[in-house]
Image: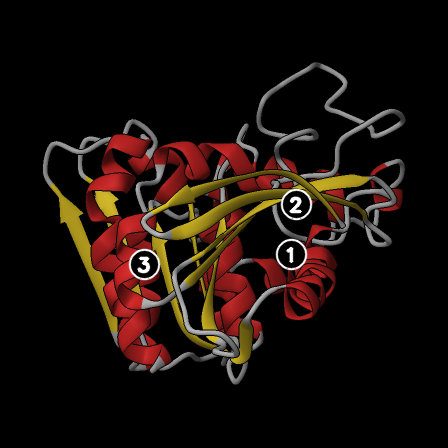
């Protein structure tokens, strides 16, 4: 692991790091904020998965999480959204919603994407091991959150690892990728046309199939231009109600899909996580 940069913030350290990933067979970059802490102290870890077109830098530069993390004693980890580099395939048409910047947090099975697009294994296994080895992290206290495509990732990762993550939340998540254009394109391209294989990467389908977490927190901008066609939080609400699983769904009047929205409610989410990580 190589340190790219380190900056003092809120008496902690905001770092950016890169390493050669065994899973993606590429160089991967991620950021970690470590709040002030006593020598020998270990801290709970919140992982944040970003959305389409993003890298680690979007939330690092615009998420406004450091003040809350310093106050609450939370390590904040932000990986990239896809493999990158020479030889990594992209969308043949150059579209933003597939390929580079759009890994959808799954392990692709379809060539040519299956060689490098292994973001599920990267964010659930390889990166956590790196965090455990190099930072003052208490990996028995982990939680996960994300935005849009990353909200989809956070929900599915938590639902499939219910004992591992103490909390999960999302901003404007793609809750049912099997039923919306962004998801149908990505799941078919990465996993093939068999829709049964898609269910393990669809939060609504996972809940329908019996997956459970203690509670979910979702914030959604009511003025989000992707709300009706791509995000469809009402499907998650219906699935949670049918399963008897607690969901707090906050529809935020006037807010869109941007980091202005995310940064406004970031501290609320981190406080929610901290309560469950104590």
Separation of marks 2 and 1 at Cα, in angstroms? 6 Å
The residue carrying pointer 3 sits among few (fewer than 14), some (14 to 19) or many (20 or more) residues within 10 Å by Cα, namely many
- Locate the C terminus and report the quarter of the image it occupies: bottom left
Total number of numbered discs in the rendering: 3
State the SS at label 3: helix
Separation of marks 2 and 3 at Cα, in angstroms? 37 Å
Q: Mark 1 points at which residue?
A: 198
Labels 3 & 1 near each other (Cβ < 8 A): no
Nearer to me, 206 or 114:
114
Q: Mark 3 points at which residue?
A: 70
Separation of marks 3 and 1 at Cα, in angstroms? 38 Å
The residue carrying pointer 2 sits among few (fewer than 14), some (14 to 19) or many (20 or more) residues within 10 Å by Cα, namely many
Mark closer to the chain start, 2 or 3: 3
Colour approach in the figure: secondary structure
Q: Mark 2 points at which residue?
A: 187
Q: Is residue 142 visible?
A: no
Mark closer to the chain start, 3 or 1: 3
- Horizontal and vertical percent position of residue 217: 28, 63
Residue 161 relative to residue 190: left or right: left
Outermost residue to the top? 93
- Horizontal and vertical percent position of residue 76: 45, 56
Residue 62 relative to residue 144: left or right: left
Q: In which quarter of the image is residue 62?
A: top left
Q: Which residue is drawn at 53% across and 63% down?
A: 156
Q: Nearer the viewer, mark 3 or mark 1?
A: 3
Nearer to me, 4 or 152:
4
């Amino acid at each position: 692991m190589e340190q790219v940069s380190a900056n003092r913030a809120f008496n902690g350290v905001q770092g950016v790091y890169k390493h050669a990933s065994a899973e993606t067979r590429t160089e991967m970059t991620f950021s970690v904020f470590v709040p002030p802490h006593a020598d020998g102290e270990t801290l709970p870890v919140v992982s944040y998965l970003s959305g389409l077109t993003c890298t680690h830098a979007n939330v690092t530069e615009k998420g406004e999480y450091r003040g809350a993390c310093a106050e609450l004693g939370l390590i904040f980890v932000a990986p990239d959204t896809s493999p990158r580099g020479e030889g990594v395939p992209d969308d043949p048409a150059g579209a933003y919603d597939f390929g580079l910047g759009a890994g959808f947090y799954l392990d692709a099975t379809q060539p040519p994407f299956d060689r490098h697009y292994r973001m599920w294994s990267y964010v659930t296994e390889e990166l956590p091991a790196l965090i455990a080895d190099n930072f003052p992290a208490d990996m028995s206290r982990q939680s996960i959150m994300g935005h849009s495509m990353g909200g989809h990732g956070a929900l599915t990762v938590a639902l499939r690892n219910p004992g591992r993550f103490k909390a999960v939340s999302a901003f404007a998540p793609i809750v049912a990728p099997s039923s919306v254009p962004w998801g149908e394109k990505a799941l078919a391209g990465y996993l093939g046309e068999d829709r049964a294989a898609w269910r393990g990467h669809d939060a609504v389908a996972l809940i329908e199939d019996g997956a459970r977490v203690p509670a979910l927190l979702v914030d959604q901008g009511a003025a989000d231009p992707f709300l009706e066609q791509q995000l469809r939080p009402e499907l998650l609400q219906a699935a949670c109600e049918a399963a008897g699983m607690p969901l707090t769904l906050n529809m935020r009047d006037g807010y869109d899909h941007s980091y202005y929205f995310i940064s406004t409610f970031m501290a609320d989410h981190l406080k929610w996580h901290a309560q469950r990580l104590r």
